[in-house]
Amino acid sequence: MTAQCISLMVNKNDIHKCAARPVPRLTAVDLQDGEVLLEIDHFAFTANNITYATLGERLGYWDFFPAQEPWGQVPVWGFADVSASRHPDIKEGTRVYGYLPMTEQLRVQPGDITASSFTDLAPHRSHLALAYNQYQFTAADPAYKPELEALQMLLRPLLLTSFLLDDFLYDNNYFDAEQIILTSASSKTALGLAFMLSHQRQSRNSTPQRIVALTSEGNAEFVSGLGYYDHTIAYDQLDQLDSDVPSVLIDFAGNGTVLAALHQQLDKNLKYSSLVGAAHWDQRKGEKNLPGAKPEVFFAPGYWAKRNKELGTAELMGRFANLWAPLAKSVNSWIEIKTIEGTEAMLQTYLDTLNGLIKPETGMIMRTHSK
Ligand SMILES: NC(=O)c1ccc[n+]([C@@H]2O[C@H](COP(=O)([O-])OP(=O)(O)OC[C@H]3O[C@@H](n4cnc5c(N)ncnc54)[C@H](OP(=O)(O)O)[C@@H]3O)[C@@H](O)[C@H]2O)c1
């Protein structure tokens, strides 16, 4: 009988439907010249991965790891080891960090190999953003520490976005706003941005006075207790928001009703409105013609490519490293990492994340098999 792996698949037509489906287990004999087999160790799972599924069709997230229709494999960030290699420059046992499917193995075609990374040149991924196709060698990553793998895979992809948003706002002089309002303020990406804005307030004279959190009533106490925001408001208390000052809105919730209410309330005082996330993925419908600044989509890999061209990778990563260190220290003081193993627990975690049942202080790490 052929050995099998379990892959967590999601029905692309209804993301409430998920299943653990068997796929054939590959070995070295299944590889073509130039191919490498990755054995997936563990990966993180947050609302961001649910957004990959929600926008899978529109933004191509289903294209990374194709599956038999109607199934799709949700991409995750995690660690894997090279278990077999038919590439002369990639050795067995090499550990990498990158974009993976929720299963046990991934076959890749390494190319553009540097001291720090390779790119999967598989044709079905060639139209997708480079940031998602690159795999970093842990041995060559100066920031890598084995004991911090959980924090890295949970936070690095999210906090890179926080960092780019912070850079974007600063580069635009905060659109001359006096307050910055963040929705889904309890999400890790929003918390990262709030930390960066407040952390740099001293060194940047132009930083707006007030950083405002909008969150669910149940998450308000946690959010305000962190001290990253100046003011925390629940979604049903929007009347507490000061609408009389120039404001910027950074929307991680993607909730059509909340977005419309904020545009109507702030009106001409809304100087910039950025659509970053869709954490409230099932509440996205809303009005299109809103008062105030026209909402603009922020796509982190696109902005990274722009800044990379302008500043170079070393300068950009240096700036990120300066913020990562204090932020990781702060996050370490409150985050509760929870590691789960096995398909039943993975399916449950997927559904709990989909249904917004994971506490914001929890960081979920998954492993398909027991170690
Ligand atoms: N544009 C980009 O390039 C980019 C990059 C990174 C992240 N993002 C987006 O930012 C968003 C946040 O991602 P994350 O991984 O940081 O999130 P996370 O830490 O997992 O966020 C959890 C929070 O999201 C809200 N939430 C999650 N699921 C919900 C549900 N089903 N119903 C209602 N609220 C729910 C809740 O916040 P509240 O109670 O505070 O609303 C919850 O505390 C995602 O949509 C992600 O895709 C975008």
Image (tube, helix red, strand yellow):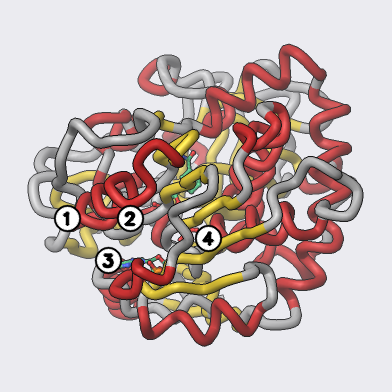
Mark 3 / mark 2, whichever is N-terminal: 2
Question: Is the C-beta of the residue carrying label 2 under 8 Å from the nearest atom of ligand 1?
Answer: yes
Vertically, is 51 above or below 124? below
Residue receiving disc 1: 15
Marks 3 and 4, the one that precedes in the sequence: 4
Q: Residue at x 70, y 63 (%)?
A: 149
Q: Earlier in the sequence, mark 1 or mark 3?
A: 1
**What residue sits right under mark 3 in the picture?**
354
Mark 1 or mark 4, earlier in chain = 1
**Could one spot residue 35 in this view of the protein?**
no
The answer to whether the beta carbon of the residue marked 3 is less than 8 Å from any atom of ligand 1 is yes
Q: Which mark is residue 50?
A: 2
**Other-residue count near label 4 (Cα within 10 Å), few / some / many at <14 / 14–19 / ≥20:** many
Front in this rendered view, residue 221 or 236: 236
Task: Tell me the CA gap for discs 1 and 3.
Answer: 9 Å
Decide: marks 3, 2 in contact (CB < 8 A)?
yes
What residue appears at the point 53 percent right and 23 percent down from the top-left corner? Answer: 302
- Asked if the residue at tag 3 contacts the one at tag 1, i.e. Cβ–Cβ closer than 8 Å, the answer is yes
